[in-house]
Image (cartoon, helix red, strand yellow):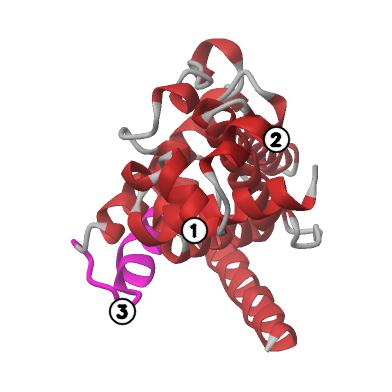
């Protein structure tokens, strides 16, 4: 991509995060990028192409957030670290999250969503499906380690995603406040209860949670 197209995408992401999906028009993005609307058509063929490029950037950042933590010998702790990264990304980037998974996403983006219970993926575009693929791998590792019982890997991944997504949406809407209570009082205990219901030992699950929290705190300290 050219420097101009990169700046237009970056401007679109800034506009999305500041003013929401509805603000994404050729005129608004061009103004944010300090260029003319012609740049949108020259480099992307129009708003459909630009929305697609913005979505690719957003999905890539999201997938990176879920997969950048090193893998350890504790697959449950690794799954929990991924869940914490998911929650952190959604809370820090609510409009990007809505673009990916919200009901108000543009048709040009929503059309790539698929029935994961049939297709095995959340999207028919590989670069958009990688985040769900990371979750499937985490489920596979927990089953292989005997931490949760053998079951339909795809269905289990879908169930666990539903927990995270539902809690994230309610917290974003303010139902759990904005002081972190949604994570500590709702989502965290819910995930532990679910893992125990899937066969994990509660004490082992709590140890994994402590390990996950320690890993996240250590990473935050390194990044500060």
Nearest to the observer: residue 59 or residue 176: 59
Q: CA distance from mark 2 to mark 3?
A: 33 Å
Q: Is residue 176 left or right of residue 116?
A: left
Q: Compare marks 1 and 3 and give the one earlier in the sequence.
A: 1
Can you see residue 87? yes
Residue 188 magenta-highlighted: yes
Q: Compare marks 1 and 2 and give the one earlier in the sequence.
A: 1
- Give the label on residue 32, or none: 1
Q: Is residue 56 left or right of residue 172?
A: right
Q: Which residue is located at x 71 percent, y 50 percent? A: 4
As drawn, 157 above or below 30 = above
Q: Considering the image in quadrants, where does the N terminus appear? A: top right
**Secondary structure under badge 2?**
helix
Can you see residue 79? no
**Secondary structure under badge 1?**
helix
Residue 153, position as x, y percentages in the image: 61, 26
**Nearer mark to the viewer, of 1 and 2:** 1
Q: Which residue is located at x 49 percent, y 58 percent? A: 32
Sort mark 3 into few (<14), some (14-19) or many (20+) by Cα contacts within 10 Å.
Answer: few
Q: CA distance from mark 1 to mark 2?
A: 44 Å
Q: Which residue is located at x 75 percent, y 86 percent? A: 222
Quarter of the image holding residue 77?
bottom right
- Give the label on residue 140, or none: 2
Q: Is residue 69 left or right of residue 114?
A: right
Sort mark 2 into few (<14), some (14-19) or many (20+) by Cα contacts within 10 Å.
Answer: many
Residue 123, position as x, y percentages in the image: 58, 23
**Secondary structure under badge 3?**
loop
């Amino acid at each position: 991509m050219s420097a101009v197209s990169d700046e237009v995408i970056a401007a679109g992401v800034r506009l999305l995060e500041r003013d929401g999906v509805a603000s994404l028009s050729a005129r608004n993005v061009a103004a944010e990028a300090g260029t003319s609307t012609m740049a949108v058509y020259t480099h992307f063929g129009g708003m459909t192409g630009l929305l697609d490029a913005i979505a690719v950037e957003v999905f890539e950042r999201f997938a990176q957030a879920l997969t950048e933590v090193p893998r350890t010998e504790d697959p449950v702790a690794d799954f929990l670290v991924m869940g914490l990264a998911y929650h952190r990304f959604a809370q820090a980037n609510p409009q990007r999250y809505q673009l990916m998974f919200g009901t108000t996403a543009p048709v040009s983006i929503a059309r790539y969503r698929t029935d994961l219970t049939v297709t095995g993926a959340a999207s028919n575009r590989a670069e958009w499906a990688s985040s769900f693929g990371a979750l499937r791998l985490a489920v596979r590792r927990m089953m292989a380690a005997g931490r949760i019982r053998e079951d339909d890997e795809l269905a289990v991944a879908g169930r666990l995603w539903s927990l995270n997504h539902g809690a994230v949406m309610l917290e974003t809407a303010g139902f759990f406040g904005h002081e972190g209570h949604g994570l500590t009082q709702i989502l965290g205990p819910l995930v532990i209860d679910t893992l125990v219901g899937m066969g994990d030992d509660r004490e082992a699950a709590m140890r994994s949670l402590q390990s996950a929290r320690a890993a996240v705190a250590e990473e935050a300290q390194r990044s500060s």
